[in-house]
Amino acid sequence: MKELSYIDLKYKPTKKDLIAKYRLEPDGVSFEEACEQLAAESSIGTWTDICTMSPKIAKKLKPHVFSINKRKNLAEIAYPEALFEAGNMPQILSSIAGNIFGMKIVKNLRFVDVSFSEKLGKSFQGPAFGVPGIRKLLKVKKRPLVGTIIKPKVGLNEKEHAKVAYDAWVGGLDIVKDDENLTDMSFNRFEKRVVETLKLRDKAEKETGEKKIYMPNVTAETDEMLRRAKFVKKCGGEYVMVDILTLGFSALQTLRKANLGLVLHAHRAMHAALTRSEHHGISMLVIAKITRLIGADQLHIGTAYVGKMSGSAKEVIDIESAINEKSFGIKPVFAVASGGLHPGHVPKLTKRMGTDIIMQFGGGVHGHPDGTRAGARAVRQAAEAVTKEVSLKQYAKTHEELACAIEKWGC
Ligand code: CAP
Ligand code: MG
């Protein structure tokens, strides 16, 4: 059968299409030719015409390049949902985010946005808790949630880890999480850490009268990850965290499908290998939409250029609205801002990202001159100041821990 053509600028996508938007820089071919070959390679074609193709297959499965903007190097492709296996994120990505990144006909290719067809969107579970479920669990109606990451990233033993968490909770933080590279170490065994830390969580809850959350990192080979998550559940934990990129999307699907009744915190370590270049890779917006569809309840999305990590304010705010917008009846995901943050950043951070966020401070708590408990107090005070619409400098006049943090790091 003669070679198929995929460009059809008159095509109008339907609810039965998955739409992918790409930024592409052709190499040695025209922009149109690059679009033709990308559409072919990501669906039913290959580099040449084939005798095994038929009009019937083409009619059913051929995608349409329906929009081309050469000035912005953008193209949009509508893929019929029949190309994809419902509920199978790896297969979907192997198609629209697979071979095409390596093709010679593009110097660079970036997968910038995606929208799923109705059927595909509804074939995933979405978050079990999301923003409403988390606010209900923590009994915190309005203010941003505040948390810390135990530091050093790894190195403390189980009891030391638990004590640092206890200091952070009694200092006023809602959430304490393991760092992304802390799992089951010779010097800090996973199960012992969970037991010791939950014991002090209970103590901190009694002393403060507030709900306190511990997010143990269960990132591991899938069966082991599930086993660890079930252990957390058995011990009375309510959350687990997973590093979604190093874990893999199918493992995230497995964890969500287990329906353990645990809040799933998605850390995105390694994302920047894919998301950082403006010219090549996969945008964090795409990763965020996929993660929400699969069903994480909270997701690191950046600090709108306030902290130490890259990610422009616009990009982060676009992601934040994407994980909160109405979509297939699934819950909104809690945006997590983390990375190089200290109390002085809170006004600018909440001005840019709003107060429906979770702010996490590692060095910004444990680096406080008076230690973790004072650092936690300073963060809580900064969040309270913003909620009361009082400037930090003003609030610091009557809150010494905040004053001390501002003296060290500014605001
Ligand atoms: C922050 C952090 C976070 C990253 C995540 C770290 O610690 O624990 O994992 O910032 O980045 O290990 O660096 P600090 P992102 O507060 O001490 O910087 O949220 O951009 O994925
Ligand atoms: Mg970390």
Image: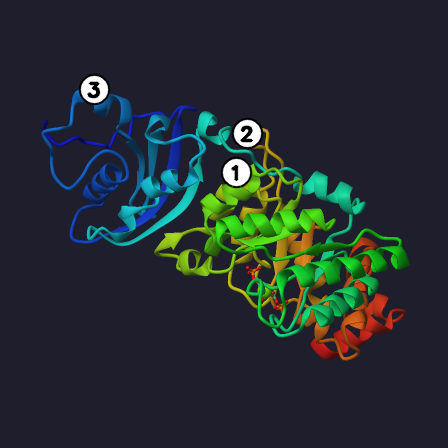
Q: Which residue has dot 2 on it?
A: 328
Counting residues from the N terminus, which is met first, the one under dot 2 or under dot 3? Answer: 3
Query: Crowding near pointer 1: few (<14 within 10 Å), some, many (20+)?
Result: many
Give the answer, above or below, for where 69 lies relative to 363. above
Q: How far apart are marks 2 and 3 (CA)?
A: 31 Å
Counting residues from the N terminus, which is met first, the one under dot 1 or under dot 3? Answer: 3
Question: What's the residue at 74%, 76% (across, down)?
Answer: 368
Badge 1 vs badge 2, beta-carbon distance below 8 Å: yes
Specify whether residue 409 is in view: yes
Question: What's the residue at 56%, 53% (across, down)?
Answer: 242
Q: Does the residue labelled 2 lie within 8 Å of ligand 1?
A: no
Disc assigned to residue 373: none
Specify whether residue 411 is in view: no
The secondary element bearing badge 3 is classed as helix
Give the answer, above or below, for where 130 lies relative to 232. above
**Residue 173 rendering spot, x and y as whole percentages:** 77, 60
Q: How far apart are marks 1 and 2 (CA)?
A: 9 Å
Disc assigned to residue 56: 3
**Residue 55 rendering spot, x and y as whole percentages:** 17, 21
Looking at numbered disc 1 in the image, what kind of residue is underneath it?
Leu
Query: Crowding near pointer 3: few (<14 within 10 Å), some, many (20+)?
Result: few
Q: Which residue has dot 1 on it?
A: 293
Looking at numbered disc 2 in the image, what kind of residue is underneath it?
Phe
**Residue 49 rendering spot, x and y as whole percentages:** 11, 34
**View quadrant of ligand 2:** bottom right
Counting residues from the N terminus, which is met first, the one under dot 1 or under dot 2? Answer: 1
Describe the colour scheme in one phrase. rainbow
Which mark is in front, 1 or 2?
1
The secondary element bearing badge 1 is classed as helix
Q: Nearer the viewer, residue 384 or 213?
A: 213
Q: Distance between the residues labelled 1 and 3?
A: 32 Å
Query: Crowding near pointer 2: few (<14 within 10 Å), some, many (20+)?
Result: some
